[in-house]
Image (spheres, helix red, strand yellow):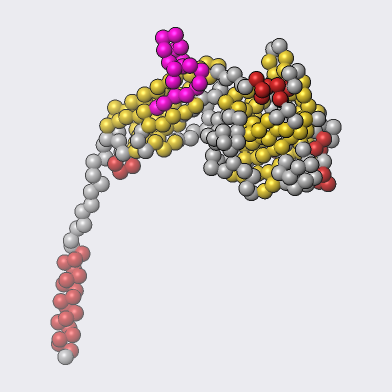
C-alpha cells in the first residue's frame, strides 16, 4: 500500500510539472488607433447670406473615423471639459451665448484595446433671441417693476436634482413663512427689473442683507465671508445689466417652461438666493407671479423660487 501511495504522488508531481511548462497565450487584437477623424458641423440656417446660421444657435454634429468603436464630443472648450457620449457619432447642441461666437469642439474617438485619437474643430455660430413681448412687459411692467420672494405660498423655495428628468423641488420644499425666524432677509430683499432704451438692468436692494452660503458657494457676491453657515450676510446691493436668452436646459415647455431665461451680467446681482449661477429659467410668469428654476453654485442642485410683484 505504501508503494502505491508513493507511485501515485510521483505521477501527480509529473503532471503538475508538465502543466507548469504549458504557456497561455493571449491576444489583445489589433491596437490600431482610430484615424481619419472628421467632425462635420451643420449649423442650422447657414447660407451665403448667413454664414454663421439663422440665429437659432442650433448645430448638428456628425463624427466619423476609421477603426472607431465609440465616439465622444465636447461641444465647448471654454466650459469645463465635458465629453458627451455619441453612440452613433451624431449629436446636436444649441449654443445660447448671444451674438456671434467661436467655439472649440473636441472629438475623442476610441478604438480597440482602449486606444483613442483626438481632434478639435472651431465653429462660429450666431445666436439671437427675441423674447415674447408679454414676458418683457410682465417682468418690467414696460418700464420698472419690483419683485420679492413670496413667503405666503408653499414651495416659494425648494431644491431638487439638476437634470432634465426632474422638474420639481423633489428633495425639499419650503412651507409658508419657513425662513422668517432664521433668515428674514430672504423676504425683504427687493429685485427691481428695468427696461431702458439701452437694454435691461436689475437693481437689487437688501435692507437686511443677502440670504446665501459663504465662500466659493456665495455666487461671487462681494463682501460675503469666506466661511460660515448659510444665513443673512451684510450686502450693499447692486445694479447690473441682464439679458433674455433661450434656456439651456432641455426641459419641455409642458413642464411648464417659457423656454426663456433671465441671464445676469457681472457678479454683484442675484435673484432671491445668493448661492446661484446666473441663468434663471422662467418656468411661469404673469403680471403678479414669477416661478424660476436655476442651477446652484453646488452644481448638482436645481433651485426653485416663487416671487410676487410688490
- Residue 12 is left or right of residue 227, and the answer is left
Does the rendering let one see residue 42? yes
Question: How far across and down, in percent of the image, does residue 201 sit?
Answer: 72, 20
Q: Is residue 152 in the magenta section?
A: no
Q: Tell me where residue 279 sits by quadrant.
A: top right
- Residue 106 is left or right of residue 259, and the answer is left
Question: How far across and down, in percent of the image, does residue 64 sit?
Answer: 32, 29
x 18%, y 62%: residue: 21
Pick the residue in front: 73 or 147: 147
Q: Find the magenta span and give its range.
A: 44-61
x 18%, y 85%: residue: 5
Q: Is residue 63 above or below residue 98?
A: below
Residue that lies at the very extreme toward the right in this rendered image: 207
Q: Is residue 48 above or below residue 81?
A: above
Q: Is residue 178 above or below residue 150?
A: below
Pick the residue in front: 301 or 289: 289
Question: How far across and down, in percent of the image, does residue 203 sit?
Answer: 76, 24
- Residue 127 is left or right of residue 5, and the answer is right
Instruction: Report the magenta stretch's main SS.
Output: loop
Q: Tell me where residue 144 sits by quadrant.
A: top right
* Quadrant in which the C terminus is drawn: top right
Does the rendering let one see residue 235? no
Amino acid at each position: 500500500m505504501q508503494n502505491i501511495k508513493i507511485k501515485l504522488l510521483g505521477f501527480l508531481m509529473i503532471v503538475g510539472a508538465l502543466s507548469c511548462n504549458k504557456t497561455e497565450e493571449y491576444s489583445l487584437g489589433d491596437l490600431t488607433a482610430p484615424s481619419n477623424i472628421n467632425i462635420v458641423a451643420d449649423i442650422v440656417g447657414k447660407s451665403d447670406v448667413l454664414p454663421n446660421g439663422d440665429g437659432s444657435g442650433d448645430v448638428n454634429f456628425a463624427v466619423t473615423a476609421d477603426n472607431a468603436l465609440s465616439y465622444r464630443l465636447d461641444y465647448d472648450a471654454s466650459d469645463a471639459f465635458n465629453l458627451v457620449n455619441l453612440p452613433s457619432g451624431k449629436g446636436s447642441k444649441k449654443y445660447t451665448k448671444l451674438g456671434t461666437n467661436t467655439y472649440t469642439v473636441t472629438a475623442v474617438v476610441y478604438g480597440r484595446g482602449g486606444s483613442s485619437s483626438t481632434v478639435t474643430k472651431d465653429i462660429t455660430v450666431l445666436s439671437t433671441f427675441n423674447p415674447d413681448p408679454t414676458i418683457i412687459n410682465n417682468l418690467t411692467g414696460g418700464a420698472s417693476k419690483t419683485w420679492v420672494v413670496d413667503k405666503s405660498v408653499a414651495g416659494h423655495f425648494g431644491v431638487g436634482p439638476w437634470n432634465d428628468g426632474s422638474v420639481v423641488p423633489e428633495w425639499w420644499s419650503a412651507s409658508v413663512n419657513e425662513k422668517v425666524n432664521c433668515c428674514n432677509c430672504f423676504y425683504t430683499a427687493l429685485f427691481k427689473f428695468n427696461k431702458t432704451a439701452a437694454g435691461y438692468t436689475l437693481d437689487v436692494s437688501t435692507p437686511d442683507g443677502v440670504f446665501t452660503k459663504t465662500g466659493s458657494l456665495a455666487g461671487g457676491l462681494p463682501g460675503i465671508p469666506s466661511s460660515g453657515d448659510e444665513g443673512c450676510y451684510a450686502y450693499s446691493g447692486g445694479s447690473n445689466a441682464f439679458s433674455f436668452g433661450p434656456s439651456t436646459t432641455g426641459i419641455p415647455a409642458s413642464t411648464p417652461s417659457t423656454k426663456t431665461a433671465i441671464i445676469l451680467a457681472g457678479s454683484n446681482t442675484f435673484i432671491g438666493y445668493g448661492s446661484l449661477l446666473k441663468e434663471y429659467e422662467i418656468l411661469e410668469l404673469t403680471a403678479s407671479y414669477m416661478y424660476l428654476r436655476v442651477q446652484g453654485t453646488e452644481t448638482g442642485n436645481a433651485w426653485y423660487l416663487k416671487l410676487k410683484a410688490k
